[in-house]
Amino acid sequence: MIISRIETIRVRQFPDLIFVQIYTDSGVIGLGESWYAASTVEAAVHDHFGPLLMGRDPFEIERHWQTMFRLSDHAGYGGAELRAISALDVALWDIKGQALRMPIFEILGGGTRHRIRVYNTLGVYGDITDGHDVWTDPVGVAKRLLDEGISGMKMSPTDFIARESDGQLLFKDDLDWALRPLREIRDKLGMEIEVANDGHGKWNLPNALRIVREMEPLRPMWHEELISPLNEEAHVRLQSATSTPIAAAERLMTRYQHRRFIESSAARIIMPDLTWTGGISEVKKIAILASVHQKPIAPHDCVGPVNMLACAHIAMSMPNVMIMEYNRAMHLGWYRDFIEPDFVIDDGFLMAPTEPGLGTHLKSSVRDRADAIIRTSDEKAEPWLMSRKRYTYPPAEVQDEFIESTGRRRAGSGAVYYD
Ligand SMILES: [Mg+2]
């Protein structure tokens, strides 16, 4: 089996959403996804990585990951290139699972569980307005979730009050006002529902320290990104100031950035975003690294629908998954416009996918949408970094002499090696 074509699909309705489909000569099609600055991810998929993958064996997932990562790391890894790698990685796992007729988690090592508890991040889409309602009827929102079997929720009470000063100035009255919904939930429902606090990296350290101390009696499930995870020492100071776990972080890229937060006391809960940080291959490694330090991972969502399925395979196979993020408004609002079959949330749990591969497909109607932007590439071409003529040293004749005398395979210079 070889990779014969790569396709990206974006829609103007959700400008950050991008699907990637890898086609093979045997007819198996793998689906991946990323989210954020989709047109730049599209360019990375087709112009940067596509030529590396075309004509190659889709089963060699780790090899392709390393090759793509080395190419992107030539100028410092991260950003759109890593999101492209993430989407391509998920699509490769989908191909392998379908070809072997097994759900991906079976290939990753098999089920350590067959469902994972979810918490609901309060969103707003269509008829579901949890993110608005929590300000006017917080107890009602919490009760509705509990009625659905969902025993945890996440809100961002301090985002609004950070706006005016860009997180530099915090008034006590503002914080009291912002924490009213959570106080009301604790007053009426006690600890019936867990509530996580997401700060979206909006605060400086001194204000974050005040917030965690002020919220201590409210017993949040965790504090997430009150400060941006740019500096793990600042996170260590934040964690040491509170008994509430600090979670970090959806914006850490690969095992290499997560390592510092896992190995230090900067975070007690590790929260990778699979579609940003390197795909299924990388989140598995991050989970293993976290397990060495006896820490759980709690995968991030609030991106597209494929992420939930990809994370489900991690959650079923890796023992140290704590809980899965879920956005009820996005799921019931628009995820089903794009994938079928849908993933299953049952009584507050994300259930193990049962179909081979990822367990879902892109609906055929997506390609027919008037707002769809579809780009395909099918040409195998050596990217410029592999061009022997322009960038290889030592000179070609010296390389040939080396290859002839040693019997080794050709290794291009620069960041990429593919024989
Ligand atoms: Mg977050």
Image: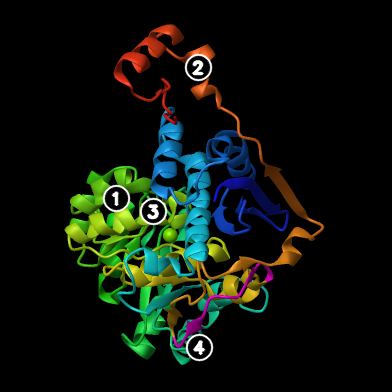
Examine the image and state in which quarter residue 283 appears: bottom left
Residue 307 on image: x %, y %: 50, 62
Residue depicted at 25% across the width and 50% down the height: 261
Against 369, is 353 above or below? below
Type of amino acid under label 4 = Arg
Label 1 residue near ligand 1, CB within 8 Å: no
Whole-number angstrom distance, CA of label 2 to CA of label 4: 62 Å
Q: Which mark is residue 281?
A: 3
Q: CA distance from mark 1 to mark 3?
A: 37 Å
Quadrant containing ligand 1: bottom left
* Cα distance in 3D space between marks 2 and 1: 53 Å
Q: Nearer the viewer, mark 1 or mark 3?
A: 3
Q: Which mark is residue 144?
A: 4
Q: Secondary structure at mark 3?
A: helix
Q: Which residue is the site of mark 2?
A: 388
- Which residue range is magenta in the image? 337-347
Q: Tell which residue pokes out farthest to the bottom in this image.
A: 147
Which of pointers 1 and 3 lies earlier in the amino acid sequence?
1
Camera-side residue: 285 or 178? 285
User: Disc 1 marks which residue?
Assistant: 206
Give the crowd class for mark 2: few <14, some 14-19, many >=20 residues within 10 Å: some
The answer to whether the residues at label 2 and label 4 have Cβ atoms under 8 Å apart is no
Name the amino acid, label 2: Arg
The kind of residue on which mark 1 rests is: Pro
Tags 3 and 2 touching, CB below 8 Å: no
Label 2 or label 4, whichever comes before in sequence order: 4
